[in-house]
Amino acid sequence: MKKVLLLKFGELFLKGKNKKDFENLLLNNIKAKLSSYEFKISYTLGRMVVSDYDIDDEWAIVEELKTVFGLIGISKAVEIDTSEENIFSYASTISLSGTFRVNAKRADKKFPLSSMELERKLGEVLLNHNENLKVDLHNPEHIVYVEIRFNNKTYIYHETIKCAGGLPLGSAGKALLLLSGGIDSPVAGFLMAKRGLKLEAVHFHSYPYTSEQAKEKVIELGRKLTKYCDEIKLHIVSFTKVQEQIHMNCDSEYMITIMRRIMMRVAERICKENDLGAIITGESLGQVASQTMPSINVTNSVVSLPVFRPLIAFDKEDIIEVAKEIDTYDTSILPYEDCCTVFLPKYPVIKPTIRRAEYNEKFLNIDALVDEAINTKEVMVLKRD
């Protein structure tokens, strides 16, 4: 008998012929996440088993595994050689009080007892050794799980710790996150990483109109995302010249619209130069003037890549809840401005048209502005602490 961590998959069981590719990627991501620990990891149908680790490291290993996309749960289990004697002997040592039921899964059909027979006999053992225990099949305080696997091993546990879920990081390709200093964009990046996308990020700053602290705030937000995303290449682009030109040459109410259209052009250029397949934004429908349906349509019209907006139907409170869960909220609300607050018009247009946007852009040298912004680009690689 030994203590192990039983790792449970999420959507991987839905995959077809390429399921093994997803499992191998998940396995590699787990190994990378736990690279500073001694351990062994093995695979048994539908489960991975982490074993032979220092028990003093167990809590830290669990905390690391909770951030691995593709895992839905971790159970601290005991692994025993499969036999009726071993299973019932261990069950007699389990100490519980309150209400319980047993949930047995017999993947190995060679085991002589059916799942229902095993549940019934284990229930009797537990009742005989715990005088303050009662059966409740519908709403128990404790569920004792028994899994009889094909590797001649049985796993027994009664708790599952929730993990990040989603798909293994990297299984869906790579994309570029428009990372501002606000609450929304880090959450958008997290949610798309949860769907298997590896992230790079771009941040637009307007020094000296925005401060160095605003830039450092965004770098810190990127670092916090690396807890889940491991490593993020951050492209920092100066947008000062672009905003000055927009302010001097474009209609006031269209300034934000034109600004975002140029941001999208810059983002698409970065994507094409770095083999990134999509752009990610933190937009939520109707939250501000630039996030109305007409505004989104006008912004989208200048790029050919897909634009993912995972927060499009989120209320602000929903976004804040996720931001707190991933520990970006307190950094996001630090009072340092971003470039979207520079030259902010009093009455931004909420129903822009492509025709009017294109008319305003005739007074700018768009290609030159995009080139100049790209040429200011500073790149840094953010890694987990």
Image (tube, rainbow, N blue to C red):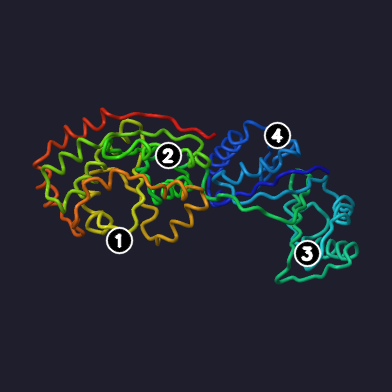
Can you tell which mark lies on residue 199?
2
Image quadrant of residue 319? bottom left
For label 4, the residue is 39
Callout 4 secondary element = loop
Residue 355 appears at what percent x and percent y?
11, 52
Secondary structure of the residue carrying tag 2 is strand
**CA distance for labels 3 and 1:** 53 Å
Q: Which numbered dot is residue 116?
A: 3
Residue count near mark 2 (Cα–Cα under 10 Å), binned few <14, some 14–19, many ≥20: many
**Contact flag, marks 3 and 1 (Cβ < 8 Å):** no
- The numbered dot on residue 286 is 1
Q: Amino acid at mark 4?
A: Phe
Q: Of circles 3 and 4, which is in front?
A: 4
Tell me which numbered mark, 3 or 1, is placed earlier along the sequence.
Answer: 3
**Which numbered disc, 4 or 1, marks the residue closer to the eye?**
1
Please tell me which residue lies in front, 167 or 208.
208
Q: Nearer the viewer, residue 332 or 131?
A: 332
The 10 Å Cα crowd at callout 1, few under 14, some 14 to 19, many 20 or more, is: some
The mark nearer the N terminus, 4 or 2, is 4
Kind of residue indicated by mark 1? Gly
Give me the residue at 53% from left, 35% from top: 384
Task: Point out residue 307 in the picture as x, y percentages from the top left corner.
Answer: 32, 47
Q: Looking at the picture, which amino acid does disc 3 mark?
A: Met
Sequence-wise first label, 2 or 3: 3
